[in-house]
Each structure stands twice: as structure tokens, then as C-alpha cells.
Amino acid sequence: MKAAIELKNITKTFGSVYANKNVSLSVNKGEILSILGENGSGKTTLMNMISGIYFPDEGQIFIDGEEVIIRSPKDAFKYKIGMIHQHFKLVDVFTAAENIILGLEDGKKFDIKAAAKRVKEIGERYGFIIDPMKKIYEMSVSEKQTVEIIRVLYRGADILILDEPTAVLTPQETQKLFAVLRRMRDDGKSIVIITHKLHEVLSLSDRVAVLRKGEYIGTVNTAETDEIKLTEMMVGQKVSLNIERDEPENPKERLEVRHINCISREGVPLLKDISFTAHSGEILGIAGIAGSGQRELLESIAGLQRLNDGEIFYHDPKSGKVENLRDKTPMQIRDMGVRLSFVPEDRLGMGLVGNMDIVDNMMLRSYRKGKSVFLERKGPRDLAEEIIERLKVVTPSANTPVRRLSGGNVQKILVGREIASSPTVLMAAYPVRGLDINSSYTIYNLLNEQKRRGAAVIFVGEDLDVLLELCDRILVLCGGKVSGIVDARATTKEEIGLLMTKLQEEGQNNAE
Amino acid sequence: MIATVINKAIAQGIPLLFGSTGEIITEKSGNLNLGIPGIMYMGGSCGVIGAYLYEQAVETPQAFWCIVIPLLASLIGSTLAALIYSFLTITLRANQNVTGLALTTFGVGFGDFFGGSMTKIFADGGNLSVKTTADYFKTTLPFADNFGAFGEIFLSHGFLAYAAVIIALLASWFLNHTRAGLHLRSVGENPATADAAGINVTKYKYLATCIGGAIAGLGGLYFIMDYTGGSWTSGGFGDRGWLAIALVIFALWKPNVGILGSFVFGGLYIAYSYISGLSRSAVAIFNMLPYVVTIIVLIFTSVRSKKENQPPQSLGLPYFREER
């Protein structure tokens, strides 16, 4: 078989971070190649370099054996490469046909009817169902994806790259898409699909290329592999981090989540029947592929997400009373005397106000204190100074706008503020994302400190090594469901890796 | 009588039509140019200045130059004003609302300063009048009188009035039936998508804003040359610029609907003068009518929320390519 694209020693860095390091792989003509890897393993970055979004720092790209330079999506189209991004790039008020011919300068007369006819022809050829005159805003997600795919085919692409195409599809739609992709392969086109769903890899692709932390691990023939082997390639060997971990002291039920369900405004289920209990004095880790419901879960506990079903009970450590937090606003939760702290994923969006200084950001938590019409600034200022000193925040002064600080320092301020109220429940979503090693360990120590104090700590993480060493128990989410709660001291990376991807497969089988 | 009223309504509506067609083209690129009132005022003032200087410079002004010189002066003035707006909002990504309002203040000041200066220097404090030029602008079709009421309503206007209607029709055709029109609309709806499709977003935004400004400026020129018969007075243009922007909403961003809308607005604007016995305060209420109608249209379209009748999705937002 001949290689349609060959990548040799591709390296791409963002700042000091390697997104791709020395990656070499090839895509054959008439095959479906899966690119498999965890979040942040550099799959999308690598494909973006082929489709002209990014330019590699080092390395070469060969198409049909000849070296090419791809600087823009237009260049990519010249080499018959088309990429279907995860977030669709479509104009809502245009019809399918108008979107498909947008930006196309083929020198022919502008004729939307002729274009619509060709769109229909392409659809029929590969078994798509498409109405070229339908407006995008009237379309379902899967129809929009069809428009994106046809747009690429309309420009004569021979190499199609699909970035997580099934993330937004129902199982039935996924099956239809796969049928279409197989037909394209039989038509001689090369198809690359980026995914982290193992069962899709196994059912669809001819070969699988695995990336881990930006590095190329290897390519295997799908027929010669299985889930266990692929998971091993994907997650790799366990790395020892030496994060301290004490045995939980006198754990008691603190937060009890019972059968919660949550459906998005578009009618997509976000959380499906989630139940678990978080104990005092322990760190409960939450693992899962990004977008499996982590954010919604934490937000429903914090009172930011409406639930369709289920209950959230809080066991008050002092009075021993049990209170239901469901459908309470954050303000009501606070007024009930529940000391709940939340370190959200989006630090400068939800956690802190970038343009305000450290003292003012402290006041976001305490502005309702005091009776005077004037604000009391002494307390927040003292708190800010204390956090700066204790957590070694590098800042010119307490009056510096937080957006001017580095990511690690911003996070220290946010976590510092949240633990200052001595919480009984502390939730932290990806608290070490983007932080250097030292700042990360500072955050781990702070979480451990809260655990020893007797708080129930919920830690949402993406690095399995960290989860395994920091947490006492790990809850694994998959597609909005709990696919397992495991003892972090006894489990393995592979087990969690499988739980992160497996349930979806079972759910799909059930649905069919 | 009724024919006269309609004739006056049309004459009143033409400057609004120029303004709204220009603003629609601008807004289709995602630029909310609130500087249109200033640009229209500048377009009118520059036209008068050009005409006046020409009339002073020659013994007997020629018809051809009497038309071309003010026309060019007006186009250049309003295009330059729109260029200022484009540079600030597209290249420097300044806030569109602030820039537009500043441009309106600037345009009115510019017109008043130069118009006023010329009045003082040349007309010795009297009226700055370019009647000769204006007469050429007002020349109607010679056979208009032979057609009775039809002639009075439709045929007895200066050439700029017909130009306004033709430009509006062309703009509609351009937006809906050409490749460049499709590209322009995509820039206003979703510039990131347009960019990814290989469309030069900056170029489209600049061109649409400058051409839109030039068209709007003609509204100012028509007002002075045709409507007032060539006499420049400070502030005479009134709130017509804002009415033009209201008309954009009334016309649901469709230039061809704007033609009808401008005549309705024109009629509402002068309705008070045909109702006898109105007090001054009642006149003020009548002057509000076009705005009231616009608000009603806004309420209706918002309630029905048909996507096609909404403003371009990225209207008022600056665009810059996201970089990681």
C-alpha cells in the first residue's frame, strides 16, 4: 500500500510545552487510521499541522512521496486535505449549499442551484442524507456534521481528517457515520479519525496510531490488537510522583449524592443517575475523559446547575443534621451554614475577576459581611497579605490585577481564598492544569492539609498518575455516568483507563 | 393634494434611504457604524463646499461640472470619514459604539466648522447658497408634468432620488445573488468561519464600511442640493442620520425593504404639517412617530425571533484570529 501522507519527526511547541515531539507516522491510501490518545496527548495539534492551522517547528510532511509545505487551510485544500473540526465552522443563517461553497473561488459563475445539485450528488454517492436548501440553524448536530463533511468532499479532498466526530452523535448517528466513512474508504479516500473511544477504534479503523503526552508510541493493525493492549499504549507505565498521602482519619459521611440526573437545554443528558458519598478526611478523585460530566457534577453540588432528578444531602459535622442542597442557590447554601468551597476549572472566568486586584478578589467572598454602607477592606487585605506570604505568591503587591499574574500564582490565590473559610467540603476542578511542578505540589499540599483538617475534598483531575497517588478513592465518570468507584491504593492505571472508556460501549450496546 | 403629500414623503425619505442602504452594507460586514449621522452631514457639507468653490471660480458654471464636482467632493469626504472608522475599529479594534458616536460628533463639528467658516468668509454672514448647482441637481424628467398624479409622485424628482432607489435595489441583489455578497454576509455573521473558508475578513470589512459610508454621504448631498435647494444652514440636517439607522432595523437589514420603509418614514416625518391646528408639543410627538414604529418593529421581530430577521450575528464585535 502507498502512503498518502507521511510525517517525519514533527515537533511543535507552545511556549516551553511540547505539544508534539518527534512524531513520525503515515496514512495509507484507502484506509481508515485512528489516532488514539488521552486528552492533551497532541492528537488535534498534530492534525492541525496537516490541515494548515499550525505550522510545525521541525520536521517534514510528505504527500504522495513529495515534501510539501502547508501554511494555511487553503494550502491544505490544494493538496486535497480536508479537516472536519470538533467545533463546526458554519454560518447559521445560511443554507447547507451556501455554507459549502463559501470561500470557494472556482472561477465558475456563481450559481447556487448548480452547487446544490452537486451537493446532492455527493450525498447520494456516499449515502448521506442532506437537503442543500435547509438552513443550518434548523439542523441537528449530525446534519451539521454532514454539511462539514460534504464541504470538504465538494472541494475534492482525498484525505479527510475528523476530530472526534462521534463526540456529539447518538449511537445510531455514529453507526450511520461509520457506514459513510467505510464507503469513502472503499472509494479510495484516506480517512484519519481522532478519538479516545476504544470501541470505535476497534470497530472502524484499519490501523491505530497511539500518541501519549505529545509523543508517538506506535502504530498497530487493528486486527492484531485489543482493548487491553491499546489502553496500555495509551496510558503508559506508572510514574511515581511521591505525593504524600495519609490514611483518612475517622471518615464520616459528609456529602451524599443520590441518583442525580441533569439534562441540557438541548435535551442531551449530561449526568445520568449519579450516586456517591464523599467522606470527611478523604480526597475523592474524579477521573474521566474531558466532558464526561465533571463540570456539571461539581456545579450541581455548588448550586449552579439545575437538576432534573435526584438529591444531594449534606451531613453537618457540628449539628449532625442532614440537609438537602438540591435546587438551592449558592447564596442559600451559604446561608444554611454549609461551608462549601469551589475552585472552578475556569479560574479567571468563574473563580476570579481578572481586572480586579487580589484584595478585591478576596472580597468576592466577603462583600456581604458588615452592616455599614461602606466596604470593609481591612479583613480582605489581611487575608490577601496572608495568602501571598503563606503560599509564596509572586506578585508586585496585593493591589496587582490578578490577570497580570502567572497561572500558578492565580491558582494559589483562588485556592487560598477558598480554603480561608475553612470549608467542610472543598471541590477543585483541574487545580493543577497548566501549573509547573512546584506550584502543583503546593496545591497538593493544600488539598492534603484540608483533608487532615477533616474536610471532604473532591478533586477532579486529568493526570492519572496524580489521581492514583493523591486520592483515597477515585470515581470514574464516563459519558455522564459513574462507571466505577475504585480504591486508589489498590487500582491500576489500566483499570481506570478502561473504566474511562468502557462504559460507553456497554451503554451503546444497551441502546441498540 | 394626496399626490403632493406622497411626493413630499418620498423627497423626505430619500436621504434616509441613502443612509440606511449604506448602513446595511456596513452592518452586513459586522460593523455597527453609529457614525453614519456624522458621515451624512460631512457628505453634504463637502458637496456644498465643492459646489461653492466651483461656482465662485468660474463665470458661468457648466452643468456637467456642477454635478460632478459636488458629487466627488461628497464621496471623498464621506469615504474618508468611513475610513477613519474602519481604521479605528478594524485595525486597532477600538470599541465600535464609542468610535461611531465620536465620529458623529466629529462629522457634525466638521460640517458646522467649514460650512460656518465659508458662510462667514464668502456669504458675509448671510446664507451660503449654491442655487445654480442645486438647480441642476433638482432637474426633473422633462415629461413629468404630462402624467398627472403619477408624474408628480414618481417622475418629478432629481436624479439622486432615482439613484437612491437603484442603489438600494443593487445592494439587495448584490447581497443575495453574488459570491462577494455571500462572502460579505458570512463575514458579518461569523467572521471566524469566513476566515477559515479563506475569505479576507479585513478586506471585506474595510470595503463594506467605506462603500457604505460613501453611499450614506450621498444622502447628505441630496438633502442640501435637492431637498433644501442648495442653501446650507448649520444643523439643518436634523436627526435624519439617526432616522436612517432606525430605518435599518425597520427594514430588517434588507435594502429593498428599506425603499418602502424610507417612504413610510418620510411620510411620518412630515405628517404633522398636513394636520391643521397642532400645537408645538403635538408636532414633537409626531416627530417621534418613525422611532415609535421602529420600536414596534423591534418588538415584533424579537418576539417572532425568525433568524433571518435578526441583525448579523457578530454585529458590533471586533474580530481577531484566535491564537493559542
Image (tube, coloured by chain):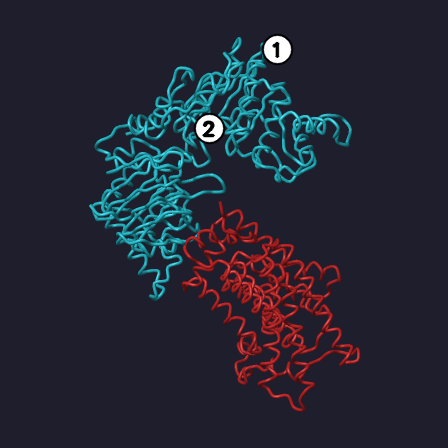
Chain colours: A cyan, B red
Position above or below: A496 against A8: above
Residue at (72% x, 60% y) in the render: B282
Residue at left 66%, top 84%?
B54
Q: Which residue lies under the disc numbered 1? A: A318
Marks 1 and 2 belong to one chain: yes
Q: Is residue A257 left or right of residue A446?
A: left
Residue A481 percent coordinates (x, y): 40, 25
- Identify the amino acid type marked 1: Lys
What is the quadrant of residue B27 in the picture?
A: bottom right
Q: Residue furthest right?
A: B125
Badge 1 crowding class, 10 Å Cα cut-off, few under 14, some 14 to 19, many 20 or more, is few
In this rendering, position of residue A78 left or right of residue B145: left
**Residue type, label 2:** Gln
Asked if disc 1 and disc 2 are in contact, CB closer than 8 Å, the reply is no
Residue that numbered label 2 is attached to: A294
Disc number placed over residue B286 in the picture, else none: none
Occupied quadrant, residue A377? top right
